[in-house]
Amino acid sequence: MVQCNDAIALIDKHKNILTQQQWLAYNAEARAIRAMFYYYLVDLFGNVPLLKSNKASVSEVYNASRTEVFRFAFHELQNVAPHLANAHSNLQGEYYGRITQPVAYFLLAKLALNAEVFTCNNPERNTLQQGTNIHFTVDGQKLNAWQTTINYCQKLQAAGYQLEQNYADNFKLHNENSSENIFTIPMDKNLYPNEYQYLFRSRHYNHGKALGLGAENGACATISTVRAFGYGNPSTLDSRFKLNFYADTVKVDGQVVRLDNGKELVYMPLNVEIDLTASPYIKTAGARMAKYEVDRKGFLDGKLQDNDIVLYRYADVLLMMAEAKVRNGQSGQTEMDAVRTRAGMPTRTATLNNILQERLLELMWEGWRRQDLIRFGRFTQSYDLRQALVNENKGATTLFPIPRKAIESNGNLRPNSNF
């Protein structure tokens, strides 16, 4: 935020050497980046300091309410969107990896979809407003949260995004020409220092070694997740399972990967436990992350790869629109059918429960599950081996606490519980 405010001030300082169009474009981009980070802060922390200038001293920094920060981010994106380039920033060129108008539209849709949650300053004390009673002015019209989501999703449709015929193409080694990806982190092992950690951290050591890369033998999927994909029942197994996970016997270049003792490396998706210390599956429990095509020439153990990291894509837009329509008393069947048909899966009725599950199946490993579960009121529930905490249903765990060091460095910051 500080860097964004510094950039905005610098752009204003040198306004005299810019054309009006240049100033508007540069100013809009810096403000859009700032609004995007406030979107993430509202989601993760709720009530946070709202800094609009680089001139504020520490003594002037106070927490703003979650609602205020949410409204600020939304209005900023609305105000700057007309001045952003109408370009697909996932495509290589002048706007590659930059915030453009479609990225702003995606964020506006996402903010509106989560408006019930994001306008709740304290989930322990306040009840959520209904999305039908939360209103925005969009193109001169007063729309509720769900209508607003639909409106911005339709703008993305009009911008020319469409589903790739092959789901896996969005995550292949060179995915810069995807017609579906909206916002990505550009990756090129010879040009950029950006690192991708998931693949490295998830695979077993010998799996990484067989690929000529490194591995950390870490993150895996929950049991409920692999069951949602239909694992264990070949007749109902979702086609996206094999693209998203390594499971069962592991092969590289047609050869079985082996453990140090000579036995086959077999990932065991249903043998996940809270404590695997005494388990024979301590190093092999759980389905591991796949999704992205492996860059066999990756640097730094494979953390420097050429696949651009996908942040926002059009499949999410369709599922957002389906959900918003259903919440608004309409049918989201067309949008949900499009996503499932592309995956080669039979249609399902577009109910809220089915849409939530479809978001899991389609967007696995893309960073949306926490937010989705909170929006659907499921985040604080027990699942698998994870038991809900006492009184967790009041919502305290849906937000991260403000770090103690931050509070100690500025007495004006108040913990979220004070709102």
Image (cartoon, rainbow, N blue to C red):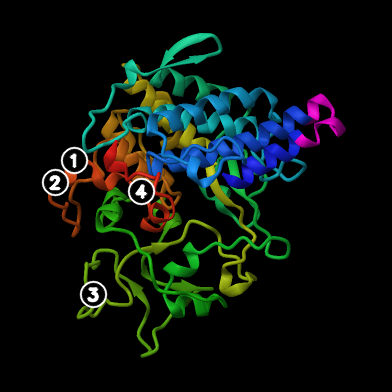
Q: Which mark is residue 89?
A: none
Question: Left or right of 122: which side holds 144?
Answer: right
- Residue that badge 1 annotates: 394
- The alpha-carbon separation of the residues under discs 1 and 2 comes to 6 Å
User: Label 2: few (<14), some or many (≥20) within 10 Å?
Assistant: few
Mark 3 belongs to which amino acid? Leu
Q: Is residue 177 above or below residue 318?
A: below
Q: Residue furthest right?
A: 17
Q: CA distance from mark 1 to mark 3?
A: 31 Å
Which is more toward the observer, 257 or 364? 364
Which residue is tagged 2? 391
In-front residue for pair 73/130: 73
Mark 2: amino acid:
Asn
Secondary element at image label 3: loop
Q: Which residues are magenta?
A: 13-22
Q: Are marks 4 and 3 in contact (CB under 8 Å)?
A: no
Q: Verify CB contact (< 8 Å) between mark 1 and mark 2.
A: yes
